[in-house]
Each structure stands twice: as structure tokens, then as C-alpha cells.
Image (cartoon, rainbow, N blue to C red):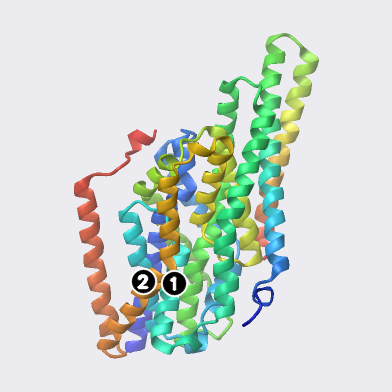
Amino acid sequence: MTPVAEIVSVSDLLNVVWTAFLAGIGVCMIFSFAIVGFARGTDARREKAGGAAVAYFALMAVALTAVMGAVVFAVVVMTSK
Amino acid sequence: MDSDVILIIVVATALAFDFTNGFHDTANVVATSISTRAMAPRIAVGYAALLNFFGAFLSLEVAATIANGIVDADLITPLIVFAGLIGAIAWNLVTWYFGLPSSSSHALIGGVVGAALAAAGPDAIISDGLLGKVVIPALLAPTLAFAVAGLSILVVYRIVGRLHPGPVTRGFKVGQVISGGLLALAHGTNDAQKTMGIITLALISSGHLGAGSDPPLWVIASAASAIALGTYFGGWRIIKTMGSRIIKMDAAQGFAAQGSGAAVILAATHAGFPLSTTHTISGAVMGAGAAKRFSAVRWGVAGNIVVAWILTLPAAAAIGALTYGITRIFGEGATGPIVVSSVLIGLIVWTFARRLRQGSPITAAEGA
């Protein structure tokens, strides 16, 4: 009987596991910050708090850029195989 | 002459399977976007079809696994590939009929393994490849997607929990357009390659390509087109099961399920594991639902889906083996595949007609 560890590449499987956790949770978390930035920024602008609005919208822009970067990275990783 | 006719039938059958794969698995990609109303149904399936097409060109890692890693290409004949494809198409139609999101990938692998077993015995099966590249990832994928989506939605709720629901819902609906697109891309990458792998296997077994060859460009382009077309014509029965019968989702859960599913599929595809997009996204949908409230998931429906998953490999294998036996009654020429294809086309028409008479379980208007 061939041991399972010899049949399946354990390191490949572990790579899949940690990459999936990092990418899945990371993207959801960063996108949530974009929504926080948008919602709080809109509230701040309505309350005429210009500085806070700029900061929140900057948070949104950075988070959205990071999400789009992750999407582009995923595509690049795929095409590199 | 006969061998060329068989090869043409095999390629046509493989593309037909690819069409049913897109048709059957549309739900994986669009169901959450439709059920949370992030996108109108027709726009969602059109968008998914387009990205499925482009996704098919991104990688060949899974195609190589299918063509060379699961059955011994030296012992495989075009007739075996044909019988395997019929097993996969037949099982896809059965599960579509009952609205169950089963795995097209496992149906394909099961069909080919069953036909190869019937034709050449256990020597034709690379058991290590089957276990390492199919069975273990099949167990891992839904569990991993369940865990990633569950943790993701908890993180999301923690971050946006104190905000007004209006902008949060609108924001995650926009996010679903992005995550749905990534999922469609991942689906095209992972699933279209299986058909590419099968056609490549047929070309190797008929002597048109050398062992270990990559799929030619015409194979890649035709597989991409077939899965995109199938996706566009969408299987609304399974969309209903995935979108609303397992759990009623909010936009944040839809985003978490799609994003986590895409992450798992892309990570696995990169490692060359031909995992099931159906298992992955179903696991992610259940994870996103159960993390919010365990009882929110309709576990009876989830149980039926898991039973279909377990049955897929052996059932498709049995149909593949039976088809090979029937085909061989007519000898090794093209008569067997022609007869079997004709019967299958008749069965498909009959099944669709019967389902149409019963009415579609979901309409574009309902989903909008």
C-alpha cells in the first residue's frame, strides 16, 4: 500500500490551503475596509467634516486599489503556469 | 477512415460535454449574484460566459493532469474516451434534471475511468494520480471553501457591522460583480481545461499527437467557445438550488462565498489539481451561511447535494463502462459511436421536452 504522503504532494496541498485562506480572507477584509471608507466618508461629507471625509475616501481608494491588485495578481499567477 | 470518423465523433462529443459543463455549472458562477440581485440574470450569465471564454486561455496545468495523470494514455483508445464522455454527459443530464449541483469534473473523470476499466482493466488506471489529483482534492475543496468563506464572512461582519445597511449592501453588490467575474475566470480556467485534456487524450491515443503533448490552439479555442456558449444558455434549475434553496444570502455573504470560492479554485488550479468548481462554491455558500447562523443553511438540501457528489464518480464510471460495452457490440469501427450518439441525442431532446412541459423553476423575471 502506497502511503498517502507519497501519492499526493503534501507541500502542494498545504500551499493551496494557505494561499486560499490568505487570498479569500484578505480580499474580503480589504474590500470591507473600502466599504467602511465609502460609508463613513459619505457621512463625514454630509456632516461637513472635510478632513475626515478625505481620510475615509483615501482609505476606500487604497483598499479598492489593493483589491484590484489582488485580482490582477491572481490572473498573472494563472498565466505564469 | 473509421478511426478518423471515431475521432471526429469523440471531439464533437467532448465539445458537447463542455457545453453541458458550462450549462450545468453556470449556477456556480452566477447564482449568488442573481439571488442577492447584484446583477440581472441575463447580464450575469452573459458576463460569466465572456469571462469563462477568456479564462480558458489562461493555463494548461489541469489539462495536462487530465490527459496524462489519471489514465495510462498508452492503453487508451478513442472509443474509451468516447464512452467516458457519454458517461459524463448522461450523469450531468440526470443531475440537471433533478436540479442538483454535482461535479462535471468528477463526472468526466469517473466516465473515463469506468470506460478504461471496462476496456483495459485496472492497469489502465493510474491509481496514485486518481487518488492524489482527484479524490483527496475532492475532499479538501468543499471543506476548505467552507472554512475560508465562514471565516471571511465573520471578518466582514466584524468590520462593517456598525454601518448603515444601505451602503453596505450596495457596496457588496458592486463587490459581487468583481468576485463573480473572478469566479467565472477561475471556472473557465479550471473546467474548460478538462475538455481540452480529454480531446488531447483522444488525439494522443489516435496517434495525432505525441505522448505528453499540450493541447493545440484549435482545441483550446473550441473548448473555450463551447463552455462559454453553455454558460450563456445557463441551467436555471441549478441556479435556483444554489442561489436560494441552500440558504437565502445577503450581498456580503454572496461576496464572501464568491471571493473565497475563487481563491480556492485559483490556488488549486495553480497547483494542477483538477478540483470541482461545484463542490468548491457549494462549500463556500454553506460556509458563508453557517457562519452567520448554523440553522440558516437548509441541511436537507445540502445533504442531497453531498449524496450527488458521492454518487458522481461511481455512477459516471458505471455509465461509461456500460457505454463502452454497448459500443463494442458493434465492433471497433464507427458504427458503435454513431448508434450511441444517436440514442443520446434522442434522450437529450426527450429530457428537455419533458422538463419544458413541466415549466422552468426560475425565470429571468423571478431572479431580477
Q: Farthest residue to the right: give it.
A: A51
**Badge 2, how many Cα within 10 Å: few under 14, some, many 20+?**
many
Residue B110: mark: 1
Q: Is residue B47 left or right of residue B118?
A: right
Q: Could you give the CA–CA distance between mark 1 and mark 2, rounded to whole angstroms?
A: 8 Å
Residue at image location 36% in from the left, 50% down from the top = B235
Residue at image location 32% in from the left, 40% down from the top = B362
Residue at image location 30% in from the left, 42% down from the top = B361
Callout 2 amino acid:
Gly
Q: Chain of mark 2?
A: B
**Front one among B127 and B192:** B127
Confirm or deny contact between disc 1 and disc 2 (CB under 8 A): yes
Which residue does the numbered mark 2 point to in the structure image? B87
Residue B78 visible in the displayed image: no
Is label 1 in a helix, a strand or a loop? helix
Residue B281 visible in the displayed image: yes
Q: Position of residue B118 (x, y in %)?
A: 38, 84
Mark found first going from the N terminus, 1 or 2? 2
Is label 2 in a helix, a strand or a loop? helix
Q: Position of residue B59 (x, y in %)?
A: 60, 64
Q: Position of residue A8 (x, y in %)?
A: 65, 72
Q: Quadrant of the C terminus of chain B?
A: top left
Say how many tags the image has: 2
Callout 1 amino acid:
Gly
Q: Chain of mark 1?
A: B
- The answer to which image quadrant residue A51 occupies is top right
